[in-house]
Structure formats: C-alpha cells, structure tokens
Image (cartoon, rainbow, N blue to C red):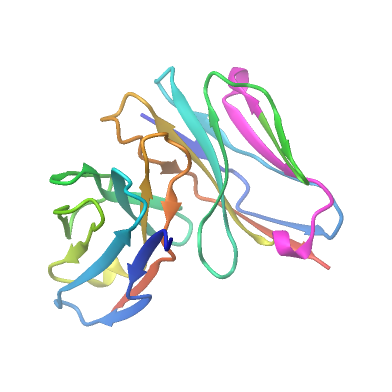
Amino acid sequence: AQKVTQAQTEISVVEKEDVTLDCVYETRDTTYYLFWYKQPPSGELVFLIRRNSFDEQNEISGRYSWNFQKSTSSFNFTITASQVVDSAVYFCALSERYQTGANNLFFGTGTRLTVIP
Amino acid sequence: NAGVTQTPKFQVLKTGQSMTLQCAQDMNHEYMSWYRQDPGMGLRLIHYSVGAGITDQGEVPNGYNVSRSTTEDFPLRLLSAAPSQTSVYFCASRGSTNYGYTFGSGTRLTVV
C-alpha cells in the first residue's frame, strides 16, 4: 500500500536560513507521481511541483529546490534564504498510476514551517 | 476562469442534520475528488469521480454520499452529521494530463 511520511511535524527557522523538508514515500507501483503543496495560514492549497518516477533530475525554482532520490524513496524540498512568507504547512503527496486511472493523491501529514523574522 | 469553487466556506450543523457541500469547476476536468483535512492527519480521500456518472469510494467514505451528474459539479452529501465529521473539506479536480490537482478554497464544517 502507498504511504507518505513527513517525519518533521514542525520546524522553526530564522529568516534567511535554509531549510529542508523531508518526504519519504512507499509504493508498489513503478510509475508514480510525487507532489508538494503549500498551505499558507489562509488555508488554500497551492500546488508547487509534480515529479514523475522516471525523472530523477533535481529541480530548482527560484529559492525552492527539490531532490528526488528513488534509491532512498525520498523527495525532499529545500527553501533557500527563507522568508516570513514561506511560513505555511507543506504537504508531500503521492499518486500511483495503476490505480483506477484516477491518480488520487495520498498525502503525508504535513510539516508546519515557521520563519521567524 | 474561477477554477474550483466550493460553497459554503463555513457551516455549523447540529448532530443528525443533513447538508450538501457544493463543488463546481469550470475547467472541463474529468477527475474530481473530495478530501477532508484533520489536525495531524493530512488530507484523506473521501470519494472521487473519474467522469460524469462514475464515482467511487476513497479512504474514508463512511457517512458521505456523492454523485456526478455533470462534468462540472461534484456535491458531497452528509446524510446525518456527526461530531466526527467536524473537519475542513476540500474539493479538487484535474484534467487528463495529471499535473497537480487544483483545489477549492475549502469548507470548514463544525458539527455540534
């Protein structure tokens, strides 16, 4: 069965520090997709990135970067030079291709990041 | 282009009451889902639909019904509300390219 583990429940950093949010997943499927979502204090869910299981290239988008390693079943998210606006709950999620075609998302329990000014 | 629209944003129900949470999308997406978010548990799938007329159960379907009569709408019905259904409910949709699901802004439901 699929599983997503975000072991870090809460993290606090001082502004401008770098921070890495960990995500470990389990799946029996060979084709799957990994996601990160941001949930700011306002409550909406904001899509950040999607990765498919065949693409292990790391990705950088501004201050955000993602490290996908199939060997360790991890998809970690790093924020460089954190800012107060990065304060949010971050969710890692997995969808598996073989299931029904719906590719529903299975979420981790989230990591609450607080950036202290 | 409104994306995914959920109504209401807030609702208080008494135990045993029924209600329908509305979800509509204007992106012609085939796939729609309902999730509930509870503290410390992330988001869990309630029901989902792969197209009009087709629905299926997710991880936590008990106490909820859905239907999908049109591509645009996917309402979630609580037949007899219980305090355990106090939660934040999110509706989501995606097209066939499997890029990230688009989520509605959520409905905060309290059952007293």
Q: Where residue B21 sits: x, y (%)?
A: 25, 68
Give the camera-side residue of B25 and A88: B25
Q: Residue at x 26, y 50 (%)?
A: B60
Q: Where residue A100 sits: x, y (%)?
A: 26, 30
Q: Where residue A32 sits: x, y (%)?
A: 45, 26
Give the camera-side residue of A46 and B77: A46
Q: Residue at x 51, y 31 (%)?
A: A25
Residue B88 location, quadrant: bottom left
Q: Is residue B39 visible?
A: yes
Q: Residue at x 39, y 29 (%)?
A: A96
> Number of callouts in the render?
0
Identify the magenta region.
A68-86
Q: Is residue B8 left or right of residue A94?
A: left
| Up/down of B39 relative to A75, above or below | below
Confirm whether the magenta stretch covers residue A113: no
Q: Residue furthest right?
A: A16
- Report the quarter where the C terminus of chain A lies: bottom right
Q: Is residue B110 left or right of residue B55?
A: right
Q: Residue furthest front?
A: B1
- Report the quarter where the N terminus of chain A lies: top left
Q: Residue at x 42, y 63 (%)?
A: B2
Residue B86 location, quadrant: bottom left
Q: Is residue B89 visible?
A: no
Q: Where residue A113 sits: x, y (%)?
A: 68, 57
| Up/down of A24 relative to A37, above or below | above
